[in-house]
Amino acid sequence: MILLRVSLLFLALFLLPDWYICKTYLSHWHNKKWKQRFWWPTLVLLLILVVFLIGHDQLHEYFGTYLIVALCVTIPKTLFMLTSILLRLFKKLIRRPVPHGKISLIPAVLVFGYILFGALKGKEYFQVKEVTFCSPDLPEAFDGYRILQLSDIHSGSWKGNEEALRKAIALCNQQKADLAVFTGDLVNSRADELVEFMPIFSQLKAPDGVYAVLGNHDYGTYVKWNTEHDRLANVDSLIARENRMGWRMLLNDSHIIYKGKDSLALAGVENSGKPPFPDRGDLPKALKRTDGMFTVLLSHDPTHWRRKVLPNTSVQLTLSGHTHDMQISLFGFSISKFIYPEHRGMYLEGNRGLYVNIGLGYVLFPMRLGAWPEITVITLKKAN
């Protein structure tokens, strides 16, 4: 039933705008061959989609490029259709001529350019977001403390593009944060994706250190391994490489940061997600040494917050990633809101908060549109 609905949605997105444009604007063309040729790009895209659906797994690496081409073709035509319909209704209302075809071209061309920017430059359009979290529980010495958060780098997607990540890490260091944290998904699946970028990630510095947790992709469950032992060895290799970069792994563990007589607890859990994502988080173990302390928790999957963190702990601030905001957000709207109740930015329940970083990298399709790659700086403030 779900597959049928998705297929019908794709058919509507591909075919309905073409049908409308042909009926409204091309019906008077005398050259029938050109009218038929207008449908060719759409039919070719549909045929390629069928090939992807029934094709070999090796074809999946090209699906991202296909998706971008499909968006560049279908979204502008859909917007043209919707604008045209509205203008034609407006024409009937005012009973005056309205050049609806020419006017409808304007938003269509603009959105085409916007999508093209997202595909060519969007994935490197790094944005620094400044966020403040206020809490009455924060120790006085940590008032104004700055935490830099990165998430979802997906190293394998950046292969051959070291310069972009060098720029991102330099931008991180310019923020002069007290602490740097990474909330999971450093690779797509394989630990060796990280090798070419280790010298770059090793440059990430903060006075109180760099700490990281694992995300669902870091467990290597999205590729086929000869044995389970091979997969586990891949995870161990990833952890070892992160440690060599100077990133301390918090695998259901915690670290205490001291400033004079005051202290702050930084805890991290392994990925804790709802199926099909792995649930290896052990909150009691991670929080074992943090009783009564102001605690910042690193947990890759934001659904962990409502499932276990809020009801079972007193953790004041949780930092997550995972959602990417689906890498596409138009005018602040993303379909990720229908999948994740907390999908981007800060969420509060009383004096307790969750921040969802939408990630620095990308996966599946090489594009970010509106949901620009994010570097977050969270400033802790003492609330009265």
Image: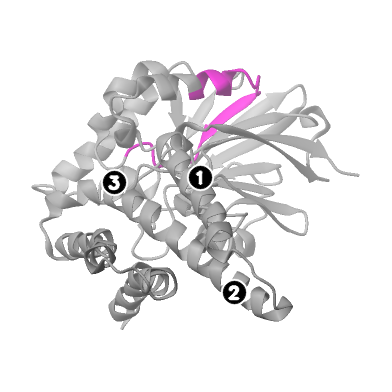
Relative depth, front residue between 344 and 30: 30
x and y percentages locating residue 162 in the rendered image? 36, 21
Of badges 2 and 1, the one in the foreground is 2
Mark number, residue 88: 2
Disc assigned to residue 114? 1
How far separated are the C-alphas under marks 2 and 3?
35 Å
Q: Residue at x 60, y 62 (%)?
A: 312
As drawn, is 326 to the left or to the right of 287? Answer: left
In this rendering, is residue 124 above or below 344?
A: above
Q: Which residues are magenta?
A: 168-187
Q: Earlier along the polypeptide chain: callout 2 or callout 1?
A: 2
Residue 313 screen position, x and y as percent: 63, 57
Residue 270 lies, in percent from the top left, at: 42, 47
Q: Secondary structure at mark 3?
A: helix
The reply, left or right, for residue 177 in relation to residue 249 is right
Residue type of the residue flagged with mark 2: Arg
CA distance for labels 1 and 3: 16 Å
